[in-house]
Image (spheres, grey):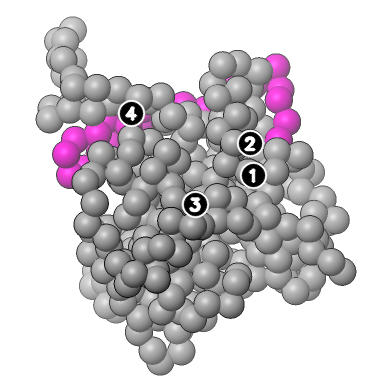
Amino acid sequence: MEKKYDILTFGDLCVDLIINGKDVVPEFGQKEKLVDDYSLEMGGSCSIFACQTAKLGLRTALVGKLGKDQYGRLIYETLKEAGVSTDYIVFDENLKTGLSIALNAVEDRAILTYNGTVDEVGPEDVSDELLQTTRHLHIGSYFLMKKIQPHYPSIIKKIKEAGATVSLDTNWDPEEKWDSGLHDILPLVDIIFPNDNEAKAITGENDPDTAVKKLREIIPIVVVKKGKDGAVAYKDDKVYAAPAIDVPKKDAVGAGDSFDGGFLYGFLTGKSIEECVMIGNICGSLNVRCIGGTKGQPRLDEVLKYLTAGKW
């Protein structure tokens, strides 16, 4: 069957209110602090990821729900402008669009989230026809999207029977239990995208190298994101490392999601694993040059310019 989409993902649809400053830690007792700046942007790991893959020319579909409010409209327009198919996004007047408040210090951030529409996608929203006409499924925000969690084994089985591949970026578990059916789907996944802390938490190991070794025993391609130090990919008995690009940093919101998008662009267009890591690092690195998760994302011509010049 002819595939209609290169990428399918389920939308953790929300907005990010990003607060920037040297001291963004709030204090109770009715204390007021002044911050340097703020920005209201589309958030959500899967949503940001989808924008990056669409900007690179991959036919990308996102399944999700939005509240009939200003935040929902902002998200919808951001996805549409990036080139993401909005055919599977539903506006629901009974829902309130999700909101994350990111308190952004120079080298770290804390996040407060109201789930709202983040956790509204269920199995009834994912048709067999859609699964059969997609080349690759990317699962993100695993622990935030509880409604669809129990159905991932069935969804993955169906999409793999249709010849598709599957990737996973768990993101952090707010409950820090690191289970919720996760270990049932790990053997079904083709590519996983943790950072060092996530790899340790998923495997229950204290040492990142031991954690990676455990993941490699289960998953064919393990890609560990290391922030400003780039990323390392493991496939078979080979290791592929590439540094990040040094660009002026505004914030790191969405950098890891953009990395995922870049890597999968390479993977789905037949690039070597080494090139996939390079492209991922280009996308992740350039993402940080702008506030928010999508404005710094490169399109394909810019990625190829960096790749050709060897500046990754």
Compared with residue 284, is residue 81 higher up or lower down, i.e. above or below? above
Q: Secondary structure at mark 4?
A: strand
Measured Cα–Cα span from mark 1 to mark 4:
23 Å
Q: Amino acid at mark 1?
A: Val
Label 3 close to label 2 by CB (< 8 Å):
no
In the image, is 67 to the left or to the right of 115? right
Where residue 106 appears, as percent x and y from the top left, is 16, 39
Where residue 138 appears, as percent x and y from the top left, is 59, 58
Label 1 close to label 4 by CB (< 8 Å):
no
Q: Secondary structure at mark 2?
A: helix
Residue drawn at x 23%, y 72% is 207
Q: Secondary structure at mark 3?
A: loop
Provide the residue span drawn in magenta. 89-112
Numbered circle sitting on residue 299: 3
Q: Secondary structure at mark 1?
A: loop
Q: Nearer the viewer, mark 4 or mark 2?
A: 2
- Is residue 99 located in the magenta-colored stretch of the structure? yes
Q: Residues within 10 Å of mark 3 (few under 14, many from 20)?
A: some
Label 2 close to label 1 by CB (< 8 Å):
yes
Residue drawn at x 17%, y 27% is 21
In the image, is 106 to the left or to the right of 295? left
Numbered circle sitting on residue 80: 2
Of pointers 3 and 2, the one earlier in the residue sequence: 2
Residue at which label 4 appears: 18
Q: Amino acid at mark 3?
A: Arg
Measured Cα–Cα span from mark 4 to mark 2:
22 Å
Q: Foreground residue, 154 or 232?
A: 232
Q: Residues within 10 Å of mark 1 (few under 14, many from 20)?
A: many
